[in-house]
Image (cartoon, helix red, strand yellow):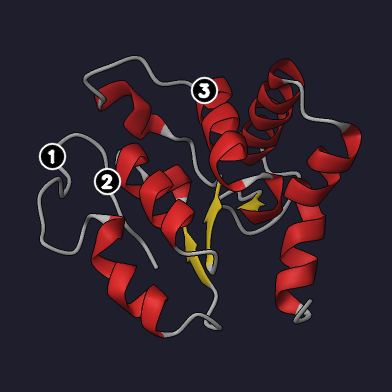
């Protein structure tokens, strides 16, 4: 389910369904339904962290260029995001994403490189990185 601002400057920044907390009641009512919020919540960090904390069936992915960080009223970077989400929900519900169809594909490879570096800098273990990069989505898709 896509949440957050959409597009570049001039895109959609205000809509009733743009805040991830809109799915709180659905996630609570259907605890076996797995929900993935993309792009770290795309500008709704506080709300997404609260949603994930309250609903163990909600996952986040790290996809995209994460350009939305430029429009935040406070400093946000990948290291902060990886740290905060790990502290709040653990690495088990963080899913690596690219917003691209295949690797290696120019700009998409840089997304992986930036995210990998951020996880290393924050102190993720090799096991945690493996979980984020492929283990978690493998478990999710295979019902584990």
> How busy is the neighbourhood of tag 1: few (under 14 within 10 Å), some, or many (20 plus)?
few
Observer-nearest of 12 and 129: 129
Label 2: state its secondary structure: loop
Residue at the limit of the structure toward the right, as seen here:
126
In the displayed structure, would residue 97 be above or below residue 73?
Answer: below
In the displayed structure, would residue 36 be above or below residue 123?
Answer: below
Pointer 1 with pointer 2, Cβ within 8 A: yes
Q: Residue 102: give its label.
A: none
Residue identified by numbered label 1:
10
Left or right of 97 on screen, residue 16: left
Q: Nearer the viewer, mark 2 or mark 3?
A: 3
**Where the C terminus falls, by quadrant?**
bottom right
Q: Nearer the viewer, mark 1 or mark 3?
A: 3
Observer-nearest of 97 and 86: 86
What is the spatial separation of the Cα atoms under label 1 and label 3, in whole angstroms? 26 Å
Residue identified by numbered label 3:
80
Q: Earlier in the sequence, mark 2 or mark 3?
A: 2
What is the spatial separation of the Cα atoms under label 1 and label 2, in whole angstroms? 7 Å
The residue lying at 85 percent from left, 31 percent from top is 125
Image coordinates of residue 45 in percent, x first then y, are 36, 39
Image coordinates of residue 8 in percent, x first then y, are 26, 38
The residue lying at 40 percent from left, 74 percent from top is 27
């Amino acid at each position: 389910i896509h949440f957050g601002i959409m597009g570049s400057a001039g895109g959609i920044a205000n809509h009733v369904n743009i805040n991830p907390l809109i799915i709180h009641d659905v996630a609570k009512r259907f605890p076996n339904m797995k929900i993935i919020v993309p792009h770290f919540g795309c500008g709704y960090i506080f709300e997404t962290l609260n949603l994930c904390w309250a609903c163990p069936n909600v996952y986040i992915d790290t996809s995209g260029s994460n350009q939305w960080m430029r429009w935040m009223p406070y400093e946000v970077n990948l290291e902060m995001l990886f740290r905060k989400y790990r502290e709040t929900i653990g690495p088990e519900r963080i899913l690596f994403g690219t917003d691209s169809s295949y690797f290696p594909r120019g700009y998409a490879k840089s997304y992986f490189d930036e995210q990998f570096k951020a996880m290393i800098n924050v102190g993720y273990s090799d096991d945690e990185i493996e979980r984020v990069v492929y283990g978690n989505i493998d478990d999710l898709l295979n019902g584990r």
